[in-house]
Amino acid sequence: MALTIVATGQATAKEPIEPILPVQNVDRAQVELGKKLYFDPRLSKSGFISCNSCHNLSMGGTDNLKTSIGHKWQQGPINSPTVLNSSMNLAQFWDGRAKDLKEQAAGPIANPGEMASTHTLAIDILRSIPGYVTEFKRVFDTDEIDIDQVTQAIAEFEKTLVTPGSRFDQWLLGDKAAITAKEKAGYKLFKDSGCVACHSGPAVGGNSFQKMGVIEPYETTSPVEGRSAVTGKDADRFKFKVPTLRNVELTYPYFHDGEAATLKEAVDVMGRLQLGKNFSDEENAQIVAFLKTLTGEQPSFPMPILQPSTDKTPAPQPFGS
Amino acid sequence: MALTIVATGQATAKEPIEPILPVQNVDRAQVELGKKLYFDPRLSKSGFISCNSCHNLSMGGTDNLKTSIGHKWQQGPINSPTVLNSSMNLAQFWDGRAKDLKEQAAGPIANPGEMASTHTLAIDILRSIPGYVTEFKRVFDTDEIDIDQVTQAIAEFEKTLVTPGSRFDQWLLGDKAAITAKEKAGYKLFKDSGCVACHSGPAVGGNSFQKMGVIEPYETTSPVEGRSAVTGKDADRFKFKVPTLRNVELTYPYFHDGEAATLKEAVDVMGRLQLGKNFSDEENAQIVAFLKTLTGEQPSFPMPILQPSTDKTPAPQPFGS
């Protein structure tokens, strides 16, 4: 028989959400290189789209569009998830088709609907720029830049994009005045209603795949089918990675199709479809108030200055075929 | 009869190029607000294009494209001039149709081929965002945000985008080792050949309109006719504002149509068409070496964090009509 230790007070109670920790254990040189690559539109065919275009660090690591804009203004199939705290995800992309940030970073560069380049072209461009050649040499001790190093550096930079210090985390860490009574009531509802079944841990999500539409089916015109595209299993249709709710105030619009414009709408739909609950206006407002306490300190750093191209650098091709 | 004081040494000789001074006399509160607006894509209809999209401060204040990409990937008619040191221009745009930075800033927001918004929509969006309402109130002491304040703040930020500290300026200021013999030879050629007739002053240009194609006509498929579009005078056809050569290493490709991919090509074309000179390969290389000494310290500041939209903020319209 197991002994159960009963918590004697709120302060020591085990909460389903854990604080975000400041970043540690990253390779600083890789981070600095990755930051430049993250902002460098020369990784796209057009020379116009960088990682930051759709995962804009001025805007919660998203583009705040329903679905993203790709090469030649193609309409993307899915809502850009935030890059903030994405290192905590169990896998990357809504359907989890990349196992980690490094694997993810390789995708958009070569996706014809996104940055529309190729890994070969991207590497040719970087190799033609002495500033990059020198920095890759210093960081990776190599004379040959390759896509593995590129995605490794971008991923290392992305690991630094965590957002500690939210009011909710201050409360978790013992500052009882950090959130209001209304926000606390929202958190209680969030727990009691079962939201925490999926939205838990430091990222308040990101740690499981779940079906969109458990109690009622989710109606959407989006053709995206989610996890089944990866596993090939019919049982995984409409399963998506549960998104983080950290900084959710900044990452509108919501859901994989971006069809929920507001947090109010998102909470309402989630309540009904996932939990079979119709939140009253007051309950909804309390939960929304709680969710806004999850906005953390946004990563802050000087805009990277990119090394110029040279006469040998392949020119961007924004127009034409 | 006037007395002429003859300079006795290189250090005191009057040079046609003057050093860039660090920024001073700006309104810091306006600058901080203007910086946010400069990076805010919500000033565009799509929610995707900001001032920084085409005047990218990671890339010498340009997009490094022949001509720019506008709303729905429209191909712009002209090469994006650098925003760096643009406060020193006698007027703004290649044809000088805006008298100053403030007037310029209003243009792209409402240009259907660029950001494709309207001033009314842009203001409605800003008014719906409490973070902006508070900041405009603090900066302009007003409850009503208007386009005049928006463009005033953007212009004030742009005034800070100067690039002192180039190697050439170090040399001008007395550090004789700051440039090499080859670079100095290039500067001498630049003066002796007559380039300084138009490219002079602190910005090494930007202070006159000149005809593109003085000795020989400039051949281009670009339909842009330059200054005559503003003055209505036939004599002003193909006259353009002389671009600054500050940071020209970063602001490729060159000319109003972006057709010169490299500095080598730009120097060759300018020599032949404007001065009737065929620079040898060695002379060309010397001038190019000199031009690269004009790269100054790039403006460096933390990426601005934008205040989130609210449930009342008009949504971006990237697709559809």
Image (spheres, coloured by chain):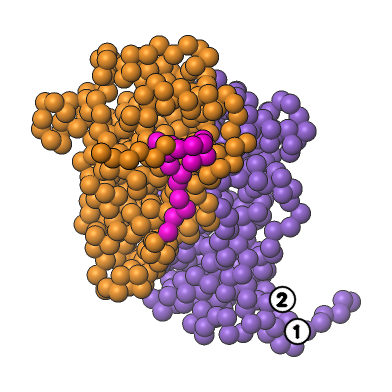
Chain colours: A orange, B purple
- Does residue A169 belong to the magenta stretch? no
Q: Position of residue A149 (x, y in %)?
A: 27, 62
Q: Report, in whole angstroms, how far the alpha carbon at label 1 lies from the one at label 2.
A: 8 Å
Are the residues at dot 1 and dot 2 in contact (C-beta closer than 8 Å)?
A: yes
Residue at position x 73%, y 38% from top?
B139
Badge 2 is on which residue? B14
Badge 1 is on which residue? B7
Q: Amino acid at mark 1?
A: Ala
Q: Position of residue A289 (x, y in %)?
A: 53, 26
Residue at position x 76%, y 29% from top?
B142
Q: Position of residue B160 (x, y in %)?
A: 65, 54
Magenta region's main secondary structure?
A: loop
- For the residue pair B268 and B148, the one nearer the viewer reads as B148
Q: How many marks?
A: 2
Question: Is B151 displayed left or right of A204 in the figure?
Answer: right
Q: Position of residue A104 (x, y in %)?
A: 27, 47
Q: Which residues are magenta?
A: A7-24
